[in-house]
């Protein structure tokens, strides 16, 4: 259910509410989510169930598509990334996003998505628009357009349930089944 | 002998199509259930299957014999791939075309546990997506399929309500992307469909 009215981000009250949400959520640096993910470059891509476990600056990003595609586990952090499951040997790179793009052809802005998937702005300038429910409906940052199609509003602060991110020709869509936060 | 292989052959004899309910649990590396889904499946030898997840989310997988379609209505996305060699090594298609079993898998009896007699299938493919798949036969026929993926995650599928050669709706093994859904993947025209290399 896409939000009805869209109010531009200029509204101080809405921006203040967003800042409050970010102050509440940003410091919680141990969280995890279970979701379904689809990644595409307009021609090709992949999909599967996603488990994302964030622990401070370290994270584990597991995608499983046992019957229909590839399953892999990507572990990333300040000192590089390791990708297992695609090859008999683990694959490594200093940069997780580059590793995923090179080995799987998946273009996923992992660092920024860690904020966007929680409905937060990543570092740097961002343009927000809000829905009738006062929650972000779109967030534009670093050339990406992030649409918040649905939210879990039965918790405080609310967390996204469906996130569609796009920077032509790349697309990352996540439907979140479960959030786990401290 | 009433070993698992005999039970499999009995299950497969004269089987054109079959349908059932499934309950699938995927366990993470430390054995915790990570993903539980339920739905219905239909299989039709030699290469057609339909795997429709209904809870907790909707997802449809249709293999029409040439392509494997995956449709996630919530993500408004259709992914399509040639039904190449990979598919023939997924446990799902083992069920679909049991006559291929000995050509593509090494089969071994595993004895009985959990109320089933078990048969292990080890793929003969170069780098299979599965270490092995175990088929469990109980009083109701094929009741369980367990397999481990390349990450060591165990998937357990429980089957129930088997129907042999059911009357299936016409479009069961066909898929047409709905209007507005984003379709990605490779739809090679029929003439050029050839098994995917790794």
Image (spheres, coloured by chain):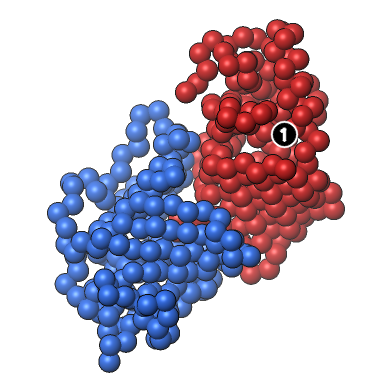
Chain colours: A red, B blue
- Could you say whether the residue bearing mark 1 is in a helix, strand or loop? helix
Determine if residue B48 is in view.
no
Residue B173 vs B91, above or below: the answer is: above
Badge 1 density bin: few <14, some 14–19, many ≥20, Cα 10 Å: some
Q: Relative to A9, does residue B67 appear above or below in the rendering? A: below
Pick whichever, A124 or A53, lies toward us.
Answer: A53
Q: Is residue B85 left or right of residue A142?
A: left
On the picture, is B99 further left or further right than B168?
right
Looking at the picture, does residue B57 appear above or below residue A136?
below
> Residue A152's image quarter?
top right
Residue at the bottom extreme, as displayed: B1
Tell me residue A144's x, y (percent): 66, 27
Residue A181 coordinates in the image, percent (x, y): 69, 42
Q: Nearer the viewer, residue A146 or B11?
A: B11
Q: Mark 1 points at which residue?
A: A115
Task: Say which chain tag 1 marks.
Answer: A
Task: Check the image and report above or below for B55 versus A90.
Answer: above
- Answer with left or right where residue A45 lies relative to residue B172: right
Residue drawn at (34%, 33%), measured in percent from left and top? B178
The percent coordinates of residue B86 (x first, y second) are 44, 63
Q: In which quarter of the image is the N terminus of chain B?
A: bottom left
Q: In this view, does A20 lie to the left or right of A153?
A: right
Q: How many marks?
A: 1
- Foreground of the two, A52 or A153: A153
Look at 57% across and 42% down and name the residue there. Answer: A178
Q: Can residue B4 be seen in this view?
A: yes
Q: Which quarter of the figure has residue B115? A: bottom left
């Amino acid at each position: 259910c896409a939000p009805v009215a869209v109010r531009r981000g200029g509204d101080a009250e809405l921006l203040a509410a967003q800042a409050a949400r970010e102050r509440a959520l940003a410091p919680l640096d141990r969280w995890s989510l279970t979701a379904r993910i689809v990644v595409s470059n307009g021609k090709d891509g992949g999909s599967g169930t996603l488990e994302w476990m964030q622990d401070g600056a370290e994270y584990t990003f597991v995608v499983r598509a046992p019957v229909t595609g590839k399953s892999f586990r990507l572990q990333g952090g300040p000192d590089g990334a390791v990708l297992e499951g695609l090859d008999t040997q683990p694959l490594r790179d200093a940069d997780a996003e580059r590793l995923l793009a090179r080995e799987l052809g998946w273009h996923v802005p992992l660092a920024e998505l860690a904020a966007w998937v929680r409905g937060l702005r990543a570092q740097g300038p961002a343009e927000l628009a809000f829905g009738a429910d006062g929650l972000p409906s779109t967030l534009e940052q670093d050339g990406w357009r992030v649409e918040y199609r649905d939210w879990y509003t039965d918790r405080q602060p609310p967390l996204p349930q469906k996130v569609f991110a796009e920077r032509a020709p790349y697309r990352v869509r996540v439907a979140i089944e479960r959030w786990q936060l401290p | 002998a009433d070993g698992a292989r005999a039970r499999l052959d009995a299950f497969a004899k004269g089987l054109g199509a079959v349908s059932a309910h499934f309950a699938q649990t995927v366990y993470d590396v430390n054995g915790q259930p990570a993903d539980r889904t339920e739905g219905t499946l239909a299989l039709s030898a030699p290469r057609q299957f339909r795997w429709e997840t209904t809870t907790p989310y909707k997802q449809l997988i249709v293999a029409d014999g040439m392509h494997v379609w995956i449709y996630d209505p919530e993500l408004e996305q259709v992914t399509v791939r040639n039904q190449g060699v990979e598919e023939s090594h997924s446990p799902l298609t083992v069920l679909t075309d049991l006559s291929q079993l000995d050509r593509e898998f090494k089969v071994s009896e595993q004895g009985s546990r959990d109320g089933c007699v078990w048969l292990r299938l080890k793929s003969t493919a170069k780098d299979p997506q599965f270490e092995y798949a175990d088929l469990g036969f109980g009083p109701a026929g094929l009741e369980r399929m367990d397999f481990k993926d390349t990450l060591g995650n165990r998937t357990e599928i429980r089957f129930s309500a088997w129907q042999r050669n059911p009357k299936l709706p016409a479009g069961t093994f066909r898929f047409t992307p709905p209007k507005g859904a984003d379709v990605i993947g490779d739809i090679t025209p029929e003439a050029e469909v050839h098994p995917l290399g790794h």
